Amino acid sequence: MQWGCMDFRLLTFGDLRLVDGKGSIVPFPEKGLLSICFLLTSSSTQKARAELAEFLWGDIPLDKALANLRQTLSRVKNRQDELGIELLLIDQATVSVNVRAFTNDLALLTAVSQTNPHTALEELLQLGRWDFLARTEVIGGSGRMWLRTQRDRIKTQMLTTLRDAISAMSEGADATVIKEAALRLFEAHPEDETVYQILGETYAGEPQLESARHIFESRRKYRWGELPVDPDPQTLSVARRLFERQRSVAPQLREQATPQLEIVPPVPRGPPKLVLLPPVNLASSHQTAVFLSSALLEDITVGLCVLKTVTMVAHYTAEKIALHLDRDAMLERYAINYVLDTRLNFDGSIYWLFAQLIYAGNDEVIWAERFSMEAQNLPRQHREIAQRIVASVASYIERNEFSRDYFERNPEAYRQYLLGQRHLKRLDLPDIRRARKAFQTALKENPYFSPALSGVARTYHLEWLVTAQGDARLLKLAEEEAGKAIATGQDIVGGYHQFGVAKLYQGAFDESIEAFELAETISPHYADVIADYADTLMHASKPGEALEKVERAIKLNPLSPDLYFWTAASANYSLQRYEDASAYIERMADPSQAARLAAASAAMAGDTRKAKALVRKVKETYPDFKIDTWLSIVPLREQWQKDQYREGLRRAGFD
């Protein structure tokens, strides 16, 4: 039987399926349908076979992935021959989607963006469910990244459309469509706090709230039932208002009441800031214990960055505050609300970490405890400290890395991981390689320890930077290790972070940006991730967005590492704000690292004397420096950025 071109429709919400003109499911290889989805949502509807193979089977060697792809495409071709139509156009080296051969529900998302919000909601409800590829298995690491990005993008569009429709709704208008859309969005994303609040606000004033009550109560059990924390106060106030209103409405009035939509604006408040201060009270003879405890607190800080209602102050700034003579002034200066203050004690055989959580507003001690720093106890202490902080400060949490059981699978693996983190404090080649050795030792103890895999990836990209020889092999190794980290701990931020960095230096800007989008979604307050995201945006020729990101990272880590200021200076240079670029470089602890950029900035600002002096300093360290050689290594997407940098360097006096 032959079908006409428009008899086929690809449905991606709920189950992924191909249907005919009558709505009957047309059997088709699932990997083929998933490939169509990937091509439809990409910037290009054509992909090389290698890229498609990596998307579908990215966690296995490429030759095996390509063999799998050949088999899949053979099945797709046979099925297309049976149907008498080509959905996928299969060539020797590429695969593309034939968009004229079928319709798809994803096209509706683009179409409704051009209509008014209420009409858009009505059309979106035609999709049925709003959970994109709900039960489709995506194997490859890059495929999982793609799926998460698409789900977040679609959820954001649905939520924005719903909010716009609520805002545009006139008094007394029928709220049926808005109520249905709110419920549909909640069913698709029951884990999202914002969606949950919108549902409550949408059902406010309804005379028949029993179903809404059950939704809220079941949601509360699902969301918070097993966690030692309370729900967000704003959400509880919405729920409480709903239930109190229901009790106050007499049964006979409920039947007569006209449905009303009541919008409760959220209370404008920022999340409290929390800083974990490392101990500084022991002498240098106890250096290993000091470093381990500091690394432990840094790792907990990174883990807590996934919290949405607490802003974590980055560990770099925490170290500076811990060493400052007037801590109270520093806490007040950076508006820090909660402090975990720590001290180390050695009783002759065991090191103990004393910790107390303090509310900075009135110096109230919320809790105090001591923790053994013996190697076998480190993973348990990680979990205990993190959970005590969450239970005391956070209003709600998501399941994240500090609650993962693999921190407790092997204490020695965790100890080696912390030692690797310690070595990375000094970015010279010997320490980078010592760190890699420690991470690899951790992986011998536990091959699936995602943070150690991320650590290995980081050492490869740092070695590439330090040696500055353009060794592509190092970047490929960094990418591979980051991919393993993603595969073993998909909700751990480190894998996505290092994958994004590796892709940046390979010049794969879109993939790098996509990885950092996911990393920031997972840990929205992780300053180092945001700073590296900014660096990617700068190299991708988006200096305005880059500056916005890095300034946010600086706010989270106000006593920032030099890399933050360097990125901010680069973004300002690309925006032709040369004096601002110079000002950021001057804030660096070691401005000589950015001497080339400083010279170009001074030259473009007209300060020839300063530019010449900086050129002399650079040539003392790098006598063979050549502009074109340097620019061939630096990944910049747009030619205008390279031309601007070249002009500044030449004006300064470089060859």
Image (cartoon, rainbow, N blue to C red):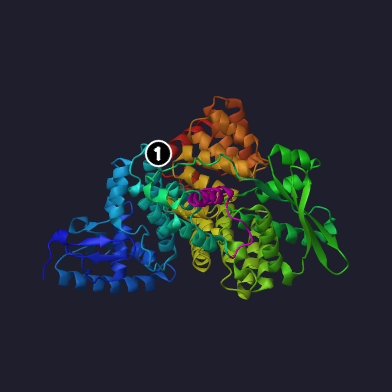
Quarter of the image for residue 136 reads: bottom left
* Residue 116 located within the stretch drawn in magenta: no
Classify residue 390 as left or right of residue 160.
right
Task: Judge left or right: residue 10 versus residue 355.
Answer: left
Q: Give the main secondary structure, helix, strand or loop, of the magenta stretch.
A: helix
Farthest-out residue, front: 252
> Mark 1 belongs to which amino acid?
Ser
| In-front residue for pair 425/400 | 400
Relative height, residue 568 to residue 106 (above, below) = above
Check the image and name the residue furthest to the top: 606
Residue 114 screen position, x and y as percent: 29, 41
Task: Say whether residue 231 is magenta.
Answer: yes
Task: Report x, y in % for residue 179.
Answer: 38, 50
**How far across and down, in percent of the image, does residue 363 sit?**
78, 45
Examine the rendering and report whether any part of residue 45 can be seen.
no
Task: Check disc 1 and report the residue beneath it.
Answer: 167
Taking 166 as reference, is 292 above or below it? below
Residue at 16 percent across and 69 percent down: it is: 83
**Residue 483 appears in the rendering:** yes
Image: 199 above or below 30: above
Q: What is the magenta range?
A: 226-247
- Tell which of 614 and 315 is nearer to you: 315
> Crowding at label 1, few (<14), some or many (≥20) Cα neighbours within 10 Å?
few
For the image shown, how many numbered marks are present on the structure?
A: 1
Residue 596, image x and y in percent?
57, 38
Q: Who is closer to the viewer here, 109 or 437?
A: 109
Q: Residue at x 34, y 70 (%)?
A: 66
Would residue 369 be found to the left or right of residue 197 on screen? right
